[in-house]
Amino acid sequence: MIEVGQEAPEIILPDQNGQTHKLSDYRGKWVLLYFYPKDDTSGCTKEACAIRDDFANFEAINAKVLGVSKDSVESHKNFAQKYNLPFTLLSDTEKDAHQKYDITARTSFLINPDGKIAKVYQKVQPEIHAKEVLDDINQMSL
């Protein structure tokens, strides 16, 4: 399992528009890397919409949001359009990122601007996760 203080493992994945993203490209910013089970399911939709509704607050503190699931680029595109999601969804169809981060359930990682794991969220509660992460970033940034 990935632990706090450890370097965040590199991932290189396509987003909902087919553009490739490297985690290391976001050095210098806080990153919420959240793994979720499946597009357009109840819990995943609640979590994504809660992040969407708080997205201006993530932008205000220069934090990046990267959602990751095993769904296809096309599935992500449909999910993002259906719910007006303003953040990046990464397609991990080969399960490369899931293996690197040892994902078995809904789990998120808060990565600090130095590229290190600042916090691991296991058993995420979809409705309150966005606010929880924002509070943690604000607390750690003091």
Image (cartoon, rainbow, N blue to C red):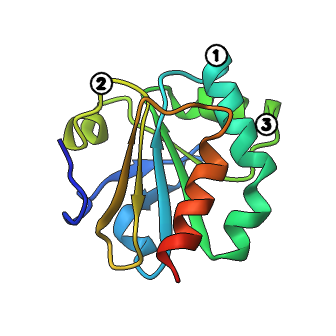
Residue located at (35% from left, 70% from top): 24
Residue identified by numbered label 2: 104
Pinpoint residue 79: horizontal percent, then vertical percent: 70, 30
Residue located at (50% from left, 28% from top): 72
Mark 2 and mark 3 lie on one chain; the one further toward the N terminus is 3
Residue located at (49% from left, 33% from top): 124
Residue 62 to residue 135: above or below = below
The reply, left or right, for residue 111 in relation to residue 2 is right
Quadrant containing the N terminus in the rendered view: top left
Disc 2 versus disc 3: nearer the observer:
2
The Cα atoms of the two marked residues, 2 and 3, are separated by 27 Å
Pinpoint residue 122: horizontal percent, then vertical percent: 38, 35
Please name the amino acid that badge 1 sits on.
Thr
Disc 3, SS: helix
> Do the residues under discs 1 and 2 have CB atoms within 8 angstroms?
no
The Cα atoms of the two marked residues, 1 and 2, are separated by 17 Å
Disc 2, SS: loop
Residue identified by numbered label 3: 81
The Cα atoms of the two marked residues, 3 and 1, are separated by 15 Å
Tag count: 3
Assess disc 2: are there few (<14), some (14-19) or many (≥20) residues with their C-alpha within 10 Å of its C-alpha: few
Assess disc 3: are there few (<14), some (14-19) or many (≥20) residues with their C-alpha within 10 Å of its C-alpha: few
Please name the amino acid that badge 2 sits on.
Thr
Assess disc 1: are there few (<14), some (14-19) or many (≥20) residues with their C-alpha within 10 Å of its C-alpha: few
